[in-house]
Image: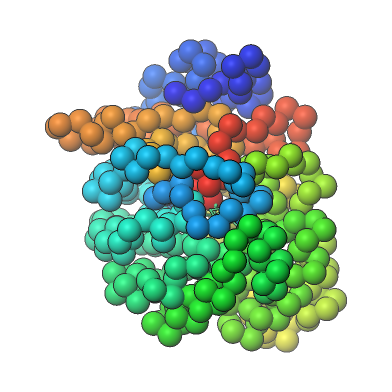
Amino acid sequence: MQRAASKTEPVIASRIPLGLVGAEQGSAIPHSAPSAPHLIDQYGRVHTNLRVSVTDRCNLRCTYCMPEEVVFRDRSELLTFEEIARFVAVAAGLGVDKVRLTGGEPLVRKDLHRLVRMLVAVPGLSDLALTTNGVLLAEQAAALWDAGLRRLNVSLDTLDPGRFREISRRDGLDRVLAGLDAATRVGFTHIKVNAVALRGVTELDAVPLARFCRERGYELRFIESMPIGADPWDRSRALLADELLALLGREVAPLAPVAGVDPHAPAAEYEYADGGGRVGVIASVSRPFCAACNRLRLTAEGKVRNCLFALDEADAKPLLRRPEPDDAALADLLRRVVWAKWEGHEINSARFVKPDRTMHAIGG
Ligand code: SAM
Ligand code: SF4
């Protein structure tokens, strides 16, 4: 069970779904939930999208994601690939059809391609994707492709080596660029490049990144900086989607919204009027998309979370490590966690309570 807001501060009722206050001491996760064939919450949102963190470790130390000094979990605490695959199979049986592997940095987990191969074989999954910082991609792109991975997001905030070092507290730009090249060489197409939009930083990088992505055929996606890193955060830290779109429209090429994209997709999509491809914005701060959210998360050590900003989570590991498999108990846990989801994250409200884990420890 996760903390309730903090040891001294009660959970603020408006962030708890109606009817669940006090369902379990200190937790908003109830003892039971309707036995639906799919994962539905009290607001009618059906959950089909699972983000799986495979490690909290990382070879970078991005300022918006983790503190400079960080203690990682012992490897023995992490779910094994077999445990992850079993969890995913149970979730797929409840209608989850999209899985994204993330972390920490997923490529620091040894032989990740083995997990990819296992997940590709899970019945019911139609979409498997990976988000990586790209530092180890050149070495692993071929194995990932051969294992069946077809969708790739590579995080890259800047094309300037010095700024890369400032943002990520490590060197590595050359390796990320080599990773992108290798991914294209082995067959990946429609690669997305993720950039966190930070006020006072991204204004300098947005246009060069946009030009780079247009030339190479990558889709650039800006993610408004969210209050989930170690640094103090307020709304003014985020460079907002509208400002970025205006900047690119002015400096790169006019942009127009793309109609008919998946209403559950967190990114709003825009197309360059000159045919130069697309840009996406994940505007969690300025345009929260909680009403259409269909995502849940599994942390590297087996906690199930119904929101990036959740204050409660449930532990799947004891169920996964029982001597006798009990998939019905896992399915019940999934239903209960999803049922308990709140209406929205309230980033923009004074009621917002920051989770006590930073992004790398949850899974981005
Ligand atoms: N290490 C991998 C990477 O960087 O792509 C995967 C994990 S990372 C936590 C997943 C995504 O979350 C990255 O695109 C990263 O830029 C983004 N991210 C991390 N901290 C963030 C924050 N505070 N606000 C918005 N996005 C963030
Ligand atoms: Fe590592 Fe990704 Fe977090 Fe950067 S954003 S520190 S690469 S997990």
Q: How is the image coloured?
A: rainbow
The number of numbered discs placed on residues in the rendered structure image is: 0
- From the viewer's perspective, is residue 49 above or below residue 29? below
- Residue 106, x across and y down, in percent: 43, 57
Left or right of residue 181: residue 317: left
In the depicted view, which residue is nearer to us: 232 or 278? 232
Q: Quadrant of residue 318?
A: top left
Q: Name the image quarter holding the N terminus.
A: top left
Left or right of residue 324: residue 111: right
- From the viewer's perspective, is residue 69 above or below residue 25? below
- From the viewer's perspective, is residue 311 above or below residue 47? above
In the depicted view, which residue is nearer to us: 73 or 252? 73
Q: Residue at x 65, y 16 (%)?
A: 9
In the depicted view, which residue is nearer to us: 262 or 337? 337
Q: Residue at x 64, y 14 (%)?
A: 8
- Ligand 2 lies in quarter: bottom right
- Residue 266, x across and y down, in percent: 60, 55
Q: Is residue 33 visible in the rendered structure shown here?
A: yes
Q: Residue at x 46, y 42 (%)?
A: 72
Left or right of residue 155: residue 319: left
Q: Is residue 180 visible in the rendered structure shown here?
A: no
- Residue 293, x across and y down, in percent: 56, 46
- Residue 80, x across and y down, in percent: 28, 46
Q: Residue at x 76, y 75 (%)?
A: 207
